[in-house]
Amino acid sequence: MSSLRDSAMTSKAWPFEEARKLLKRYEKAPPEKGYVLFETGYGPSGLPHIGTFGEVLRTTMVRRAFEEISDIPTKLVCFSDDLDGLRKVPGNVPNPERLEQHLQRPLTDVPDPFEKYESFGHHNNAMLRRFLDTFGFDYEFVSAREFYASGQFDEILLKCAEKYDDLMKIMLKSLREERQQSYSIFLPLHPESRRVMYVPMKHVDAQNGTVTFDDETGKEWTLPVTGGNVKLQWKPDFGARWAALGVDFEMYGKEHATNEKIYDAICRTLGARPPEHYSFELFLDDKGQKIAKSSGNGISIDEWLTYASTESLSYFMYQKPKTAKRLYFDVIPKAVDEYHQQLRAYAGQDDTQRLNNPVWHIHGGDVPASDMVVPFSMLLNLASVSSAETKDTLWGFIQRYAPDTGPDTHPGMDQAVGFAVRYYNDFVKPTKTYRLPTDQEREALEALRAELAAYDGAMDDEALQSVVYAVGRDRFDPLRGWFTALYEVLLGASQGPRFGGFIALYGLDETIALIDHALAGTLVG
């Protein structure tokens, strides 16, 4: 066993902890199907979103961890429940009125309002696959429509008919009395209207594999449960899908956690072993409210990627999945800088430390070097004081600070510069609020100006920080008040970078001029 695998077997990183639980499933014998199966589910009633990304990414992290500790092959299936009925017309599609007449029909029977694919379900499936391909995920796509219609699900559906009473007992315990009266695990697709029928079954014939029901007009129908003529309600479908595919691992948001026992019981009743599962906490907006597609709060994946890299989003997703996290624009700079801090640390770490480092899981062990010579938060402050509208403005300061850097040699840095300009103009610029210094702060700023004007040392972050620190130490207790004054008076922000590093990057003369403007009151104006 390699030293890396040894370290992985004791790593406290959560993907390895989950991978080791999964490995125990097959400590006596390998899986009969020849591989370990990871699954993620997707409801194609809308476009993929940041939660979809997080679910597939985190599952992929566990898969990579498993591959590090085991030689058993793996697969990842992304399952689309595109046989689900259209419950309401989305508000963000063209020609929504055209969809009204198709309510309760399977998504793959509903016309595509975008007029690009054969159905709305096919359109959203295509968007999902493009979405996953863009981020380079290794997966196999499975459509519920094809899964039901092709016969792949037939064996389990026939077993559902055979075990109908047992499955109904499991489900009825979880339902209100009113719902119990009309509930069935089977949802027939009406032979004429193709609508998904939420009706009770008059008879389930296990021997012939059929169900009998009355439609809304009172007409009786008998349909085979196989061949895509019926689908399962979503909770039974969850457990039945696990049984049909042989799923070994699935993670989902905590809204599913209360149903885990139901999913597991369905799977066991159908003769299969439930997978290992992992529920993660939901994302919150800046006010602590749950993020929902319908309310439009929080931040979308496209919005994140407008201001920062995919890797920074992956870093955010890796962190404490069991803890509810606020997901809004202000978290982006911190995620970017912490991601690069971890990249820089990785090179000097041993195997144990590397496997606990988020970047190992983000990059699957193939970790690149960081070319960020200036932190993202510093770029934002630099953009703020220089009123940067283009990347060239920031590169002018960066190349004076680090002459050997440039857009061609430091592409990651160049990308971050572009993000910083965009983030500054969209978020920092509209909220900048300068204030005048107090008498104590004015005296300190005048002293700092004099020290900088007389400074003849190297343009070194630490040396300049010492100058700033010495001025404040003699005048402020606690010292935090001094740095708060620098940020609020000079940068128009409540917090900021190490000020010595800022001076080194921005320049002595430029910083002196900035102090002059602040003392004259022109920044407030």
Image (cartoon, rainbow, N blue to C red):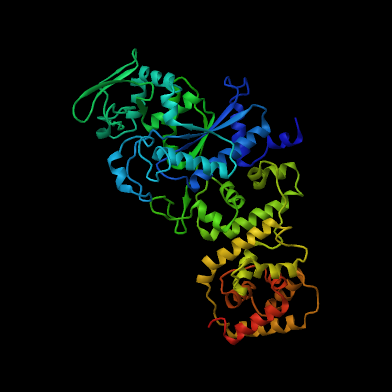
Give the residue at the far top of this rendering.
Answer: 207
The residue that appears at 56% across and 63% down in the rendered structure is: 423
Give the residue at the far front of this rendering.
Answer: 115
Relative to 149, say whether 14 is above or below.
below
Q: Where does residue 81 sit, x and y in percent of width and height? A: 42, 34
Along the horizontal axis of the image, is 355 left or right of 270? right
The residue that appears at 56% across and 71% down in the rendered structure is: 493
Q: Quadrant of the N terminus?
A: top right
The residue that appears at 66% across and 29% down in the rendered structure is: 70
Q: Where does residue 490 sit, x and y in percent of width and height? A: 61, 77
Q: Residue 509 falls in which quadrant of the image?
A: bottom right
Along the horizontal axis of the image, is 330 left or right of 509? left
Q: Where does residue 58 sit, x and y in percent of width and height? A: 56, 41
Along the horizontal axis of the image, is 82 left or right of 517? left
Q: Where does residue 251 sit, x and y in percent of width and height? A: 51, 37
Relative to 525, say whether 53 is above or below.
above
Residue 265 in sight here: no
**130 or 104: nearer the viewer:** 130
**292 or 290: nearer the viewer:** 292
**169 or 190: nearer the viewer:** 190
